[in-house]
Image (cartoon, rainbow, N blue to C red):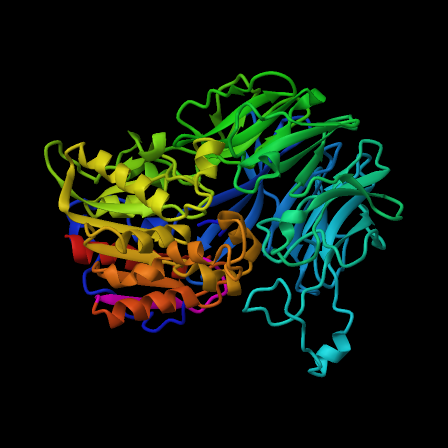
Amino acid sequence: MKSTGYFAFALCFALAVPLSSHAATTASAFQLSDLQKIVNLGEPQISPDGKRIVVVISTPDWKADKSKQEIDLVDTASGARRTLTWKREGISSPHWSPDGTRLAFVADDAETKQGQLFVMPMDGGDAQRITEIKRGVDSFSWSPDGKQIAFVSEDEPANAKAIKEHDDAFQVTDNHFLTREALTPWHLWVVPSAGGTAKRLTQGSYSLQTDQQDDTPVPAWSRDGRSIAFVRFPGPYWGPSFHSVIASVDASGGEPRTLVPDEGSADVIYAPDSDTIAFVRPRNGDQNNGNAVYVTAGSNTRDVTQALARNLNGYAWLPHGKSLLLAAEDGTHSVLWEQPLSGAAKKLDLGDVEAGADVSVSKTGVLAFIGSTTTHPGELYVMDSVSAKPRRLTNLNTYVDSLSLGRTESVEWQGPDGFHEDGALTYPVGYQRGQSYPLVLVIHGGPEAASTVRFSPLPQLLAAQGFVVFQPNYRGSTNLGDAYQHAIFRDTGVGPGNDVMAGVAAVQKLGIVDAQRIGVTGWSYGGYMTTWLTGHYPIWKAAVSGAALTDWVMDYTVSYYQTGDTYFFGGSPWMAKYKDIWREQSPISYAHNVTAPTLIMGDVGDPNVPLLNSYEWYHALRDNGVQVEFYAYPVDTHFPKDIVRTTDVYRRWVGWMTRHLK
């Protein structure tokens, strides 16, 4: 599962208990109407000289139920901001030309209805479309001299005419059960940056992208511009993507050659003015470890992040190519490290700022990233160097500063099996020492993810209703090192469940929890943990199960990440050697133990955790007399992406807890 539903049986009906029952006395607390105003900033890119930053701004539009997008230009010295694009949709991937005179980006084109490449002069003038690719552009990069752009695009089907005539049966291989047509591979092209005819560089059954990667890997030009490195997946389906390698092809064309044969390699970047490359790979090739950054210089490849021994969310080269900038969770904080190619990493002093993983570095060493605090959503930050303090450049979410928010802090405890564990704890708005409050757990998905103290809307919505909110990390989480992350191997339910319960006990020792009013909630693997916990512990008075995996065997059989599941257990559930453990760690095997009133939610077309899991859970609970309601959203995502449905999910989520715990 990679992070973080259903036909809308009764989407138009509200829960009986409104969300305003507690908020009436705390009118300035964070509410659903505030959720609908949060501006999202993403993909910051700093200019080569470090003086300007472009960032994608997404503003919710409730009436249209979509986000209005624009690319803004921000001055790093003054914070002055101006909009570069106008009435464009599908905006992504802004990238400066090497000399900083032009900006390229992807946006939906009115004619092709696909994302195409546009190039804009930064001294004034309109953006010009330079591609007309039928399947659109997914990722791209400038050549060192700025004369060409390499991009990745999906192939058109070879049998398009037959498909149009309904001769369209396709072979089932590594696809998920919702697949409606055979996928075609993604391949590499180059096009003149001034516009012209695009030239194809790669072809074959292998692919430069899969159907479920979060982002298309960006092609990397060599410093002389003669070759382009790329991630080579076995095919267009995510299932065998763990066998990816790094390959390279001449910019003029020819047969690709393998640069890094180690499977699982991805995200390749050349060091500045060097033939040295860095890439990401699960540490020691073990998929149950975190992502490490390896560096290859000549014939020597080594993990330069081995001493950190933790999962890294992102990285970038620092100027001169002698060190890397790393982004990761460290306990309940999102931090940045400076990692020399030789020697110990040094954590940057970010003060109270929690750093996003997408960090851009100028040739002069200035850093740009999206950061947040415990009480403020994401904004654009800049650091003049790795030793400077972060400066906030935007104020797009300042309305939150006038609200009464629940205080969020780290909580730690000694867990089972010798693990020192942690989580984020948010106090109710208006908290008074000496009083006890109902407790709601919000368990993160993944499981390769982590809960941190950064601003999060859902805990604040719950805190506004008078709940203590606990976001526990558990074995499999990425914030406490490889040993902790790896401990989920062949222990996907019992161990994580014990970790969470140890955390609940630690929170109860604070003397702030009403032990008779405790609820458990989560989405994705957080939904799995919710169903597991309600089937094993009787303390829960209510539960919210979102996009939950409830049956490992079924999930393996119909979801897109079959191979990913086998790394948890060591082999297929259809092999005698492994079959028992898959059943033993499936919550559905213990559904008869559940007594907590349960709200189930999810998306009808979810390829990540197919809704069949939730249907099983719904019928198992209903047939055993448990109070259960099940709501489905008619979209093809793992969590609704639009603001209207997102608001509805949170309304039902908080409302269910209010209804059963207050």
Q: How many marks?
A: 0
Residue extending farthest to the front is 576
Q: Is residue 648 visible?
A: no
Check residue 629 for magenta coloring. Answer: yes
- Residue 433 vertical position relative to residue 243 in the rendered view, above or below: above
Residue extending farthest to the left is 434
Frontmost residue, 21 versus 484 = 484
Frontmost residue, 74 versus 535 = 535
Q: Quadrant of residue 477?
A: top left
- Residue 204 vertical position relative to residue 357 in the rendered view, above or below: below
**Magenta segment range?**
626-639
Q: Is residue 250 left or right of residue 259?
A: right
Residue 115: image location, x then y, percent: 66, 57
Frontmost residue, 93 versus 160 = 160
**Residue plotted at (40% across, 40% down):** 397
**Residue plotted at (46% across, 37% down):** 485
Q: Quadrant of residue 111?
A: bottom right
Residue 594: image location, x then y, percent: 24, 60
Residue extending farthest to the bottom is 165
Q: Is residue 556 visible?
A: yes
Q: Quadrant of residue 51?
A: top right
Check residue 653 for magenta coloring. Answer: no
- Residue 75 vertical position relative to residue 199 in the rendered view, above or below: above
- Residue 53 vertical position relative to residue 249 in the rendered view, above or below: above
Residue 238: image location, x then y, percent: 61, 55
**Residue plotted at (37% across, 54% down):** 528
**Residue plotted at (53% across, 37% down):** 289
Residue 535: image location, x then y, percent: 27, 56
